[in-house]
Image: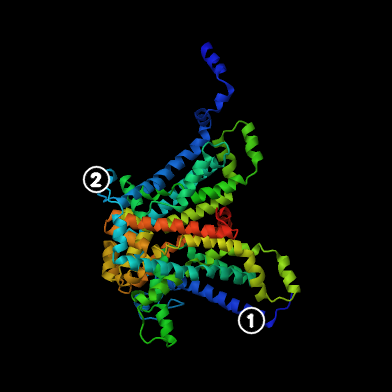
Amino acid sequence: MAQISVEQKAVPKRKRDNGFLRFFKQWDIQLMVLPALALIFVFSYIPMYGILMAFQDFNIFKGMGGSPFVGMKHFQMFFESPEFMNVMRNTIVISLLKFAIGFPAPILLALMLNEVRHMFFKRLVQTVSYLPHFLSWVIVSGFVVSLLSTDNGSVNILMEKMNLIKEPINFLSLPEYFWGILVTTGVWKEIGFSSIVYLAAVAGVDPHMYEAADMDGASKFRQIFTITLPSIMPVVIIFMILAIGNLLTAGFEDILLLAKNPVLRGVSDVIDTYVYRIGIENSRFSYATAVGLFKAVISVMLLTIANVIARRSGNSLW
Amino acid sequence: MVRLGFGDRFMMIMIYIFLAFLAFVTFYPFWNALVVSFNSGADTSLGGVTFWPRDFTLENYEIVFQDKRLLNGFGISVARTIVGTITSILVTSVFAYGMTKRELMGRKYYMIMCIVTMYFGGGLIPSFMLIRGLGLMDSFWVFIIPGLVSVWNMIIFRTFFAGLPNGLEESAKIDGAGNWGIFFKIILPLSGPVIATLSLFTAISHWNEWFLPSIYINKEDLLPIQTILRQILNSNIMSEQMSNLDSASQAALSRMQSVTTKSLSMATMIVATVPIIMVYPFVQKHFVKGVLVGSLKE
């Protein structure tokens, strides 16, 4: 006993700052974070290690340790495959369409809602327009299929009544309509919910500015462009950066569910659905991983570039 | 109030018309699905059923509620939503509280480790191989364990906890309470709004998840309702759909000649949507705050 107490006294004060000791002394808070970090490690970082598969001829029976490395073979195969041009075109066109229409739409909605003076009407529009965000894509695609069906779908009935068409059109099996349907459905689902952030930003604009503009005789219409829009620009730019980072994410669940008809493959195949089809359905694991990695790398690059541009203008994500 | 000029009045009229149109277009698909689900299938196929049921019937729902497979799927969805939400909120909030501690060693590295996962991931195939390697295929736990920690929710929780007054913690510490005690006795009870918001979001994403079960689950009796619904919507031919039903509901179906694929699909869709509609008022009360807290971080 005596010896121990002597030893304890002998430890210089600075030594107590020793990393290990300090770590074990705060075991209670470490215990709060370490299990969660372990889960993150397993479910996020081990798959990152699994990316190595992209450079192997992965064989299920040999595992990752035993499968031979083949370098960039699968990437080259993807670039030279007949699907490459098609998949890239669809991915870029669909995501650009979604960006061009889906990005400004909620901003426009927020600006409009901001002008509404009847609180009941405003609340009603908000309540209804937020709702689709909370529905699964399965349900939403069910709505779309039902509305567009040739078997008394509401859209066909309406168009026939308006004498726009003579025969019902089978919209979901004609490639020329697919992009339009996809983008419209996406906007329909998310316009309300995405407008929330912009509405909050609009609400934060100093009311004195509007009063001053009223004094100067500026019309409401003018005020939207000279006061409201510039005021919410920082928020708009942040969301634009995020959207640019997602430019290669043209969609997944929506395309999988709406493009059930294989006829549509020429216009509906995007990188993510291609990875799914090749990887999970055809079990070409290495090839699909390579395609997925190609997309992930470009996405990170896009995000970085967008952020650099934004930083120059003074609105950075990081 | 300044009197509006002609141009502004025109603009206001256009805005009201457009918003009314938007509300109608958003609401109509729900309403039409509801109407078709309560209308006799044979009558629906004659056309013209839009705003109101013409031949009211409960047959479609009778079939749905007799289908053991659908009921089972509903049960699986309820179970995964409840278990998944409670465990995920618990693990994530404890994690977030630990991360608010300045003295936490390695905090900076832990945070970087979290943030990286928000921008880069292994992707579909490596994750699939991992789940398979862990033996989680065809197990209920595949719904729960991979989603236990949400980095996004952790950051929202952390922002909220950091905004709580420090004094409470200090005084509890003087009374001899440990960090875990402080968390459960003081921090959690003060976090009602953020817990409500994040629980609702987590619950909704559990309820709506259909894709991962479709690749991780082969056992019929483990499929959640959304995945089953997808299979039903996919099988456009009635006979195919009937073969998906169990024998009891098939017998019932043959008695009710008027039920069609469409009416049955709509009834199933409504059944899968009702829980969302039921929690929606609570969601709406909380989510605006939740979305804003989330975007604060950015």
Q: Residue B165, how many percent across, how many down?
A: 65, 43
- Which residue was labeled with disc 2? A62
Q: What residue type is labelled 2?
A: Lys
Classify A157 as above or below A55: below
Provide the chain ID for the residue under circle 2: A
Judge whether residue B191 can be spotted in this image: no
Toward the top, the furthest residue is: A2
Compute the Cα span from label 2 to label 1. 71 Å
In depth, the one of A205 and B186 nearer the eye is: A205
Determine the residue positioned at 38% across, 54% down. Answer: B123
Disc 2, SS: loop
Q: Which amino acid does label 1 sit on?
A: Phe
- Which residue was labeled with disc 1? B10
Q: Residue B48, how many percent across, how many down?
A: 41, 81
Judge whether residue B215 can be spotted in this image: yes
Disc 1, SS: helix
